[in-house]
Amino acid sequence: MAYLLKGVSILGAEPTDLYIADGVISAPVENAEVVDAAGLVALPGLVDVHTHLREPGREDAETVETGSRAAALGGYTAVCAMANTSPVADTAGVVEQVWRLGREAGLVDVQPIGAVTVGLAGKQMAELGAMASSAANVRIFSDDGFCVADPKLMRRALEYVKAFDGVIAQHAEEHRLTEGAQMHEGEVSTRLGLTGWPAVAEEAIIARDVLLAEHVGSRLHVCHVSTAGSVEVLRQAKARGVRVTAEVTPHHLLLTDELAAGYDPVFKVNPPLRTRSDVEALRKALLDGVIDVVATDHAPHAVQDKECEWAHARPGMLGLETALPIVLSIYGPQWELIADRMSRAPARIAGLTGHGGDLTVGSPANLTLVDPSARRVVDPSELASRSRNTPYAGMTLPGRIVATFLRGEATVLDGKAVK
Amino acid sequence: MIKHLRSAADLDAATATLILDTAGEMAALSGREVKKLPALRGRTVVNLFYEDSTRTRISFEAAAKRLSADVINFSAKGSSVSKGESLKDTALTLQAMGADAVVIRHSASGAPHRLANWVDGSVVNAGDGTHEHPTQALLDAYTMRSRLGRLDGLKVAIVGDVLHSRVARSNVLLLTTLGAQVTLVGPPTLIPLDVAAALAEKTQVSYDLDAVLPDSDVVMMLRVQTERMQDSYFPSAREYSRRYGLDVARMKKLPEHAIVMHPGPMNRGMEIAPEVADSPRSTIVEQVANGVSVRMAVLYLLLGGK
């Protein structure tokens, strides 16, 4: 199938006609299906380096297929699936299973992330090489949900993955400082009587890990940076030339710990929502490039895991279908910035060469079309995710994803998933 | 009148004063031979207790019964809760049974807030995790007012494990609303972060009990659990007691009129010496008696009793 995107604005430039044929951006072809793209902006397909698809193990919360559909509807063409499934993605067998499920769903490229340690237990290194050599071709390794706390093990993992150009994505949390933690430690946690998750528990691990990465000359990626102090640690490390990259979630760019006041666990997430000054520092860091990418940390949870007491609820919130609208609401139509932080840079970190390219003739046709003038109210019941735990219910957000193309095939048209 | 009592912050000065005044009328009843009022006849009050707390439960039970309400005691142990029923499902069950008020004690902070989303009746917080215990604060305020004649301008020292204390949080909020000046005293590890900004701007913090006592009208000792030692909040029970316990020598530093309070249960010899707990300054037994009157007032006013 060939397409003609008529009157499309590539990254906000003057309207033009863009042809897609044989999986790539092409020169004009005959018999292309015309998509009226007047007023729409084309972006390289978004890439998420941090997604929880829950399969295998919690198919009641999300599956590779439902998560892929949510991703495509959010403008994504590739997502990296976190390893904290059940069983854990710590062997070639499990990562290949997730990879195959992604291919079968065929809505986005599902790139599995492998666990750093067996069972996420932080004790013994998983067979990282086997996962790298598998059909899933794993390049990012993470124990996300848990921190690789042991400094020796972290050092070895950073070193070991150099052999296949891998990267360790660290969930930075000094668990001894967050025992029983329920929300950001500060004024609001004091008022609500909820055990605090201090900012220093994140900052101390990032500080340690950038020093380890510097010492062994390895790449480090820092998951979901949430504090102003972490930004300063990263800024200094980058200035010294440490090979560190970092991500921030849409929710940490927008929401604050004040939202915990009603004890609704839809606002419970790990790392927790922080303060207004943290939010401001994160926004600036993404702009500066101290933080490289926006990653969703899309974390679907079944209803019963959120309709309960705050302390008993699982942490995490949905993100794939609202990420771009939230970034647009914060930064406005800065299309170059959005393309870099949500597509090019994450594709580079994940080693996904077919994604995050320029929309020039001959490039793989992985792209999404956005209507920046549209506004919509977030309705949890309309989400494609199997779960409903969005913190944005009822909010009016700018931008509507009209179409998404994966290697030239439409996965979303007229704002609807094609399958 | 407010519908729920989830936090002492739900109470403005007028409402809090009305509750205390009403409690005074209720207390007058307890001197009579027949202690019962027909005010809540036909209404149902459920005591939903997820934590063992005989003292608080029987206090609420006595309060509801003296107002002629039907009382259902629902304790988590041996019920559907121990079989894994969620708070929401329990709430829907109580709702179906027509509970006019649910008194909830729960180990999770904010459980009363969650419960209020799922039931139509009034929710009364009888202690939630490390958050609040508003009726304890009301009975404490009532006790102070009875003994000292006023709350406005009173200097109150709350001493001990403020970090984990729901009694302290509710007292800071309520006493400040009623014009008292609260000073929190304890080791820095047990005083929560940004406490003045979080609860009440004029709250003061001190790490030196001896310095605070001479200028206090009320000193409220909080229970300190010895398990906190294992978590490095302080090195030993003995050191805690030496620095923050109220013994006879320290009690002598208080002004002549000052009173000593404790929400119970006490660790005698730890945060409070037996001689202090049993001294005429101590209001500990009065607090228990006042608890029933204050809880009667709360149920009466929340349920619009006539």
Image (spheres, coloured by chain):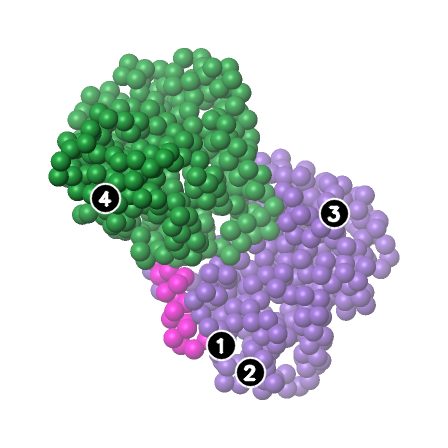
The first of marks 3 and 1 along the sequence is: 1
Residue type (three-letter) at the residue carrying disc 4: Val
Residue type (three-letter) at the residue carrying disc 3: Gln
Number of numbered discs on residues: 4
Q: Which residue is mark 3?
A: B204
> Image height check: is A396 above or below B69?
above
Task: Identify the disc placed on residue B100.
Answer: 1
Residue drawn at 56 percent across, 42 percent down: A275
Residue at mark 3 shares a chain with residue at mark 1: yes
Compared across the picture, whether A226 is left or right of A100 comes to: right
Chain letter, disc 2 residue = B
Query: Can you tell which of label 1 and label 4 is closer to the viewer?
Result: 4
- Residue A10 percent across, percent down from the top left: 33, 34
Instruction: Find numbered disc 3 in the image and state the secondary structure of the residue it sits on.
Output: strand
Residue type (three-letter) at the residue carrying disc 1: Asp
Closer to the camera in the image, A124 or A172: A172
Res A226 seen here: yes
Tell me what hue chain B is rendered in.
purple
Could you give the CA–CA distance between mark 1 and mark 2, rounded to whole angstroms? 10 Å
Q: Which residue is mark 2?
A: B40
Q: Is residue B85 magenta?
A: yes
Asked if marks 1 and 2 touch (Cβ < 8 Å), the reply is yes
Could you give the CA–CA distance between mark 3 and mark 4, rounded to whole angstroms? 66 Å
Chain letter, disc 3 residue = B
Compared across the picture, whether B119 is left or right of B126 comes to: left
Q: Which residue is mark 4?
A: A35
Residue type (three-letter) at the residue carrying disc 2: Leu
Chain letter, disc 1 residue = B
Query: Can you tell which of label 3 and label 2 is closer to the viewer?
Result: 3
The first of marks 1 and 2 along the sequence is: 2
Compared across the picture, whether A84 is left or right of B243 comes to: left
Res A193 seen here: no
